[in-house]
Image (tube, rainbow, N blue to C red):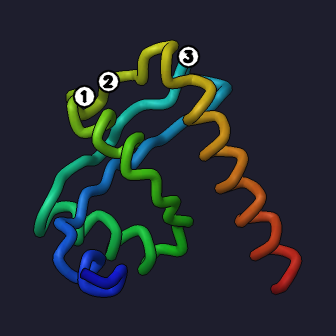
Amino acid sequence: MSDQQRNKNRVPRAAALTYNPETDQAPRVVASGQGEIGRKIIEAAKQNGVPVHEDPVLVETLLAFEIGREIPPELYQVVAEVLAFVQSMERRSNHSK
């Protein structure tokens, strides 16, 4: 099976995080789902200019958490890397405007 066929057959999975260092102790899961819900989360992010980062292992882990729950300390490092990626994408976007 080709990569294109695998991607076509893959069930969309998504988790959305929010983090405000001034008010939050840790990032929180604000949306998550798979299938149609996952597709809608991804679509909404793209339509609203929110960067989308693909990490199948992380999203599988985040799907297990309740909405509104802070991520556990074990995920701080990997989520910090994702947030750094998002910030760099936002800076690039702002420089190109």
Q: Hey, which residue is sitting farthest left in the picture?
A: 36
Near mark 2 (Cα within 10 A), the count class, few <14, some 14-19 or many ≥20, is some
Near mark 1 (Cα within 10 A), the count class, few <14, some 14-19 or many ≥20, is some
- For label 3, the SS is loop
Compared to 11, does 57 lie above or below? Answer: above
Label 3 or label 2, whichever comes before in sequence order = 3
Compared to 38, does 3 lie above or below? Answer: below
Is there CB contact under 8 Å for labels 3 and 1?
A: no
Q: CA distance from mark 3 to mark 1?
A: 17 Å
Near mark 3 (Cα within 10 A), the count class, few <14, some 14-19 or many ≥20, is few
- Kindly identify which numbered label has been placed on residue 65: 1
The part of the image, by quadrant, that contains residue 90 is bottom right
Residue 73 as seen in the image, left or right of residue 88: left
Residue 67 pos. (x, y %): 24, 34
Residue ID at (17%, 77%): 9
Residue ID at (72%, 46%): 84
Q: Amino acid at mark 1?
A: Phe
Is there CB contact under 8 Å for labels 2 and 1?
A: yes
- The residue to which callout 2 is attached is 69
Q: CA distance from mark 3 to mark 2?
A: 11 Å
Residue 55 pos. (x, y %): 45, 52
Compared to 94, does 34 lie above or below? Answer: above
- Kindly identify which numbered label has been placed on residue 25: 3
Label 3 or label 1, whichever comes before in sequence order = 3
Residue 13 pos. (x, y %): 25, 57
Q: Amino acid at mark 3?
A: Gln
